[in-house]
Image (cartoon, rainbow, N blue to C red):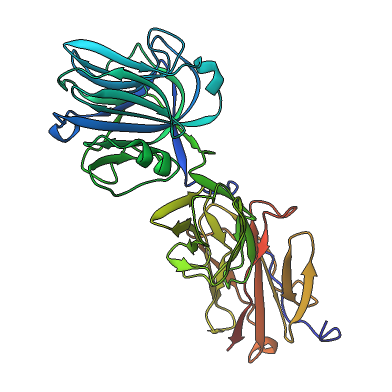
Amino acid sequence: MRSSVHRVLAIALVLATCSAVSAQVTNKALKVDGENGYLRVPRDASLEPADQLTIEAWVKGSGAVSHGRIIRKEDGAGYHLSWAYQTNRLSGLIRCGGIETAYDSLPNWHYLDEWHHMAMTARRGGEIRLYIDGVLVGTAPAPGCLGHNGNLTIGDRDGGGEGFIGEIEEVRFWNVERTAEQIATNWRLPLRSGEGLVSVWPLDGDGRDVVGSNDGAVSGSVEWVESDSPLSFRTAPNRGGWDGGDIVTLTGYFDIFTSTPSVFFGTVPSPSVLKQDDFTLIVEVPPAVQPGRYVDIVIRGDGSELLGQTAYLLTPRLLAPTTVEAGSVLPMGLLIEPPTSVLVFFGAPPEIDLPFRQYGWKFQAFPLVGVFSGTFPFQTDVAFQIPVPDSPALVGKTILGQALVGPSFNGKDASFTNLVHFTIE
């Protein structure tokens, strides 16, 4: 501590309690139960190539109703990926006049409750090829035509009754037959460009097509759940000071990067990234562009992009004017995503540094007495006012203020804000 006890002018204990803050999930997956819902993409000519195609999806299966449709665009003619079409094996099918199906040799229980990448390629008059995790597992002769009919659906057939049970994400459609080398090289990558790439549905909370114009809409009831697929990564800790400098550990599958990738917090690059191994990155948090806000963590390198499972919270900045009149009110604000709770302290300089090991933060405060005390509600989600005593003894005094913010004040979910200074006139 820099000083002994000084005469203290003020303290405010402000408690405004709403529901708890929780980490914002950014990387999601479509979860279907096989009975109640799926994603429907309206029929479009861009999804109906006449000569060749490739369809891909990441799946985490736990069962199926009937055939277990993962991707289906077939109403008398078309294509689909299935979990259990007419048997207990994963498959890819082309229907044009007759039906030709490429099956995996293993039973589908071999893949239960784990993420796997499925891909089917086909060329009319050539072969249907089925790949699991980049490896060719089954082939069948392709029909002499590629016929098309109906909407494209993800998670079931249009109208229901043949539903997949599990999670799906990163569905891609190409109007070219991808080669075995391309599948093996790129199955782990969240691609957003490439020759013949028509549509990509990340299924990251909605049915948007992020490459083309074939947006989908939910039919029935589905869930959007936090994804733990290899296309995302974990962050620990998932919050830190708005002024940067904290060190976080990212864990995931980073062997797709041939060199150390760049890491962005929102739009701001990290000043330091260390690739410890193929599964761990040690990253320095940059100073905040938007203190008190959640920002996505994005890893970019070698033409690929990975999104973190949860957003990173840049802990909030306390706002206050530099002067306030005695007998008036002090307007204050917090740059933070509501809802939250806040405890605000006021006192006299000089400031001291008091580490709080429980929270992992530093309280820059002072011995306190109860001059400003009481409970004051937020006027808005991020603003509140505190009455200033009409006392001549306070005029000309500089006051320090700092807040403790979090869903509760008994654990590491809480953190201290910056220190503010204002003068009473």
Asked which quadrant contains residue 118, the reply is: top left
Check the image and name the residue furthest to the right.
Answer: 4
* Quarter of the image with the N terminus in it: bottom right
Q: Position of residue 273 (x, y in %)?
A: 57, 66
The percent position of residue 3, horizontal first and vertical second, equals 83, 86
From the viewer's perspective, tell me whether residue 275 is left or right of residue 175: right
Left or right side of 29 for 128: left
Query: Which corner quadrant of the image does residue 147 belong to?
Result: top left
Side of 364 where 312 appears, left or right: left
Quarter of the image with the C terminus in it: bottom right
Q: Is residue 182 left or right of residue 392?
A: left
Total residue callouts: 0
Q: Could you tell me which residue is drawn at 41 percent across and 27 percent down? A: 222
- The quarter holding residue 74 reads top left
**Is residue 342 something that shows in the picture?**
no
Tell which of 12 and 45 is nearer to you.
45
Q: Position of residue 99 (x, y in %)?
A: 24, 11
Residue shown at 41% from the left, 44% from the top? 185
Q: Is residue 372 above or below residue 77?
A: below
Q: Nearer the viewer, residue 148 or 380?
A: 148
